[in-house]
């Protein structure tokens, strides 16, 4: 029999029992977040492009699903990112701070077919607004670990970084004649490409690279501009009282930048299951600085990981 109908590449379709298990895992996580006073927020599936485009994470701008609103004539986009919407909701609602939110929303990104990436997936997350402290970082990282433990994922590795370390070092130690190389340097750090980086003219910054790459904490604590940041990462790692491995990554830079300051990823068996960090810079771009931090879990990647773990 020839079937003429099909579905687009990169979308989701589930049958029982996978659909039931997926729903149960989502409910279990959302109920847990609610019990920790992270109250659910629901944001629109589509929004006006001109309201958010300039504040969107740069790589997402070429991955938008667009259509024209017949009522207003304006361009509408399907939700490409939840954090931006939650941040906008907080700004518009003028709510009392600090505030904690959780969500479970579908994300839509027009990925190229050959990239083998989903163009539709569900994301679960938690956000804190109005607190700017390492205690907030510890709270959100600990919460993310607890969520993954809740669905029986152990053997976790938590990578914690602070992008301000690289920014401060470049501001102080990169010679002015090499400022035009800054973006290239950040890209190489992002890709962990130490050998290429060492071939560049870096001035005094070049003498610090090995200490960053090797995580030589004693050496880094002697560098005055970044000493507070290094001390904060050490304190965060000591206060995360969980059964997991913690790795402080000083040779790290998120490029293009999404998080500002402390950020983290949580792995199990080399799979990234959760990512998060501070993003007060995003709030500032949107018109008002409010400290913010959070995490996101791709539910469908999580389900794939759990399924692989079972077989």
Image (spheres, rainbow, N blue to C red):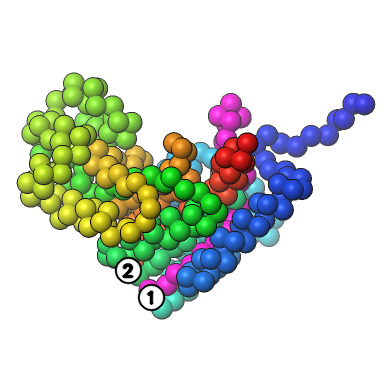
Where on the picture, by quarter, is residue 180? Answer: top left
Magenta-colored span: 97-121
Of residues 170 and 228, which is closer to you in this image? 228
Quarter holding the C terminus is top right
Q: What's the residue at 61%, 57% (across, down)? A: 26
Q: CA distance from mark 1 to mark 2?
A: 8 Å
Residue at the bottom extreme of this rendering: 96
Residue 93 sits inside the magenta stretch: no
Q: Which mark is residue 11?
A: none
Residue at the right extreme of this rendering: 1
Q: Which residue is mark 2?
A: 131
Q: Which residue is mark 1?
A: 97
Tell me if residue 221 comes above or below residue 207 in the rendering: below
Tell me whether circle 1 and circle 2 mark residues in contact (CB < 8 Å): yes
Upstream in sequence: badge 1 or badge 2: 1
Tell me if residue 79 comes above or below residue 205 in the rendering: below
Label 1 sits on a secondary structure element that is loop
Label 2 sits on a secondary structure element that is loop
| Residue 51 coordinates in the image, percent (x, y) | 49, 57
Does the rendering let one see residue 251?
Answer: yes
| Residue 211 coordinates in the image, percent (x, y) | 15, 36
Q: Callout 2: few (<14), some (14-19), or many (20+) C-alpha neighbours within 10 Å?
A: some
Of residues 268 and 64, which is closer to you in this image? 268
Tell me if residue 260 comes above or below residue 96 in the rendering: above
| Residue 64 coordinates in the image, percent (x, y) | 56, 43
Residue 141 horizontal side relative to residue 196, left or right? right
Q: What's the residue at 27%, 42% (across, down)? A: 249
Q: Callout 1: few (<14), some (14-19), or many (20+) C-alpha neighbours within 10 Å?
A: few
Tell me if residue 102 comes above or below residue 65 in the rendering: below
Residue 118 sits inside the magenta stretch: yes
């Amino acid at each position: 029999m020839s079937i003429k109908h099909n579905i687009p590449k990169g979308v989701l379709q589930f049958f029982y029992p996978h659909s039931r298990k997926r729903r149960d895992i989502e409910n279990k996580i959302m109920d847990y977040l609610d019990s920790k006073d992270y109250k659910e927020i629901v944001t629109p599936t589509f929004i006006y492009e001109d309201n958010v485009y300039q504040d969107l994470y740069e790589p997402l701008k070429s991955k938008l699903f667009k259509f024209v609103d017949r009522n207003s004539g304006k361009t509408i986009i399907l939700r490409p990112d939840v954090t931006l919407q939650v941040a906008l909701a907080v700004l518009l609602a003028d709510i009392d701070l600090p505030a904690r939110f959780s969500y479970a929303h579908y994300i839509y990104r027009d990925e190229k077919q050959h990239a083998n990436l989903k163009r539709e997936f569900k994301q679960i997350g938690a956000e804190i607004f109005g607190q700017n402290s390492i205690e907030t970082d510890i709270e959100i990282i600990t919460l993310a670990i607890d969520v993954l433990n809740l669905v029986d994922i152990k053997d976790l590795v938590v990578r914690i970084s602070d992008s301000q370390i690289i920014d401060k070092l470049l501001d102080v130690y990169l010679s002015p004649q090499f400022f035009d190389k800054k973006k290239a340097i950040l890209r190489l750090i992002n890709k962990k490409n130490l050998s290429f980086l060492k071939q560049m003219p870096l001035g005094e910054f070049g003498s610090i690279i090995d200490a960053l790459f090797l995580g030589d904490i004693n050496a880094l604590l002697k560098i005055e501009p970044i000493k507070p940041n290094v001390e904060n990462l050490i304190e965060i790692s000591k206060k995360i009282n969980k059964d997991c491995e913690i790795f402080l990554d000083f040779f790290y830079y998120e490029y293009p930048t999404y998080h500002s300051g402390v950020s983290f990823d949580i792995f199990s068996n080399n799979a990234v299951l959760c990512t998060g960090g501070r993003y007060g810079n995003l709030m500032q771009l949107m018109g008002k600085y409010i400290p913010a931090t959070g995490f996101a879990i791709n539910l469908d990647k999580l389900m794939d990981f759990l399924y692989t773990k079972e077989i």
